[in-house]
Amino acid sequence: MAKIIVNTDDAPKSAAYSQAVKAGGLVFVSGQGPFDPETGEVVGETIQEQTAQCLRNIEAILLAANSSLAQAVSATFILAEESDFPAMNEEWLKWFPTDLPARQGAKLPIRPKGMKISIALIAEA
């Protein structure tokens, strides 16, 4: 099974991990925070704004992998505050109105640069 590293300038990069890896017919997108790809700064102050930025970053990575959010099969989100769940979920449903991927959540123990959320996702390649 071939492993292909996916990178794009349209999403934040890290020296410590790949944006995504394609393998076995799937695209494994690393956890994405609400960071602007050009400045590295957090985008938005509300959980809705930050959720949307995470999903924009994921969407850009999936497009670079010749996939899309419509092909998402599973996602893991990590919230800094459990009380943000309802508002995060409201934004999430704008991006996934039908054919929802499987999903799991957890609490973010720290908040790097004030981020409120991180989302990792697996999609069909």
Image (cartoon, helix red, strand yellow):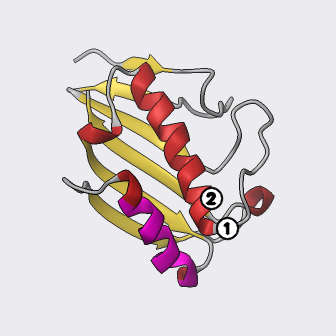
- Tell me if mark 1 has few (under 14), some (14-19) or many (20+) residues whose alpha carbon lies within 10 angstroms of its own: few
Does residue 21 appear to the left or right of 12 in the view shown? left
Going 51% across and 65% down the picture, which residue do you hit? Answer: 78
Determine the residue positioned at 65% across, 66% down: 116
Q: Main secondary structure of the magenta part?
A: helix
Tell me how many marks there are: 2
Q: Residue furthest bottom?
A: 83
Q: Position of residue 100 (x, y in %)?
A: 24, 56
Left or right of 73 on screen, residue 68? right
Whether 88 is among the magenta residues is yes
Question: Picture quarter containing residue 104?
Answer: bottom left
In magenta segment, residue 57: no
Q: Quadrant of the C terminus?
A: top left
What residue does disc 2 label? Answer: 49
Q: Amino acid at mark 1?
A: Thr
- Tell me which residue sits at (75%, 30%) in the image: 38
Q: Pointer 1: what residue? A: 46
Q: Nearer the viewer, residue 18 or 101?
A: 101
Which quadrant of the figure has residue 115? Answer: bottom right
Q: Is residue 38 left or right of residue 63?
A: right
* Quarter of the image where the N terminus is located: top left
Q: Looking at the picture, how far across and down is residue 40, in whole percent?
A: 77, 39
- Residue 84 in percent (x, y) is at 56, 78
Amino acid type assigned to the residue bearing label 2 in the image:
Glu
User: Which of the pair 94/23 is nearer the observer?
Assistant: 94
Q: Do tag 1 and tag 2 residues touch (Cβ < 8 Å)?
A: yes
108, above or below 65, in the image = below
Which region of the structure is painted magenta?
A: 83-93
